[in-house]
Amino acid sequence: MVEILKRATGFYIPFILFVLVGGFHLIYNYTDGLWVLWFCENFDETRYQIFSWFTLLGEPQVLLPIALVLFMFNYGRGLFVAAAWLIASIITIALKQLIANHRPAYFFEDVFIACAGEIQLWFNLSTPSGHTTAAFAFFASLAITARHKSLQFLFFAIALLAGLSRMVLFMHYFYDVYWGAIIGSVSAIIIWFILHRYQGIGFLNWKNNSVSWLKK
């Protein structure tokens, strides 16, 4: 596990800082709707539109094509990224059903409409944030396979923006985003460890292969 963290310090050092600062925030300033209500009170249409694009970084129609392209060029990287994303998403779906709490719009729908107009809102299955989980699992996996620390940090920033978008768009509380980030980032570590420790599928033997016509 330590080896994996060393491989991607550019991602996991800021992630650990996020976990620590976010944890203290939840302990000492825990209020349902604190951040989503702040974004509502300070609503900016341009910011809302920008983060509507960032939130796509947690959706399968964006992540799946990227994973497929990665797989074509490098079987191991593509499989790793897809597996981490899939496992983290399954965990999130199960937790959503188990916890089954309401999203901010369930309590503040009229407030959001008053500040932002007629916007798309969801009401149930809030914790954890699926978009955040997917983004952190996906981009943590990319960071682990990246060589440059600056690129790893960029992947963290992208995942964080995807998570932040869920509050800007009034879809999730901070603690939904917080736990989604943890589930996604830890899932990437676990999947990397499994693929390299247990060789039932011979991962190390073919991980650097690619689609044959790309080699020509």
Image: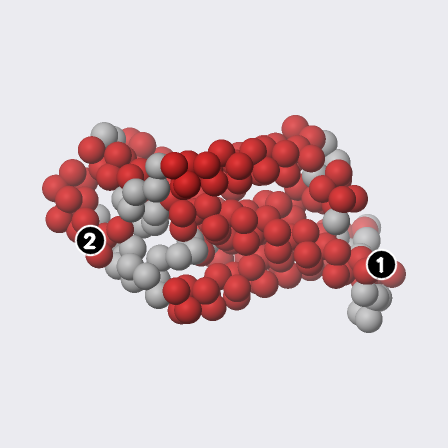
Residue 35: x %, y % from top left: 31, 38
From what the image shows, is residue 157 above or below residue 64? above
Report whether 133 appears left or right of 119. Answer: right
Point 54% across, 49% down: residue: 182
Q: Residues within 10 Å of mark 2 (few under 14, many from 20)?
A: few
Query: Please, what is the three-letter code of the amino acid marked with disc 2?
Result: Phe
Residue 200: x %, y % from top left: 82, 71
Instruction: Judge by depth and name the residue closer to the eye, 110 or 61.
Output: 110
Q: Is residue 118 visible?
A: no
Residue 53: x %, y % from top left: 39, 42
| Disc marking residue 107 | 2
Residue 70: x %, y % from top left: 67, 51
Instruction: Judge by depth and name the residue closer to the eye, 36 or 205.
Output: 36
Residue at image mark 1: 204
Rendered image quadrant of residue 167 = top left
Upstream in sequence: badge 1 or badge 2? 2
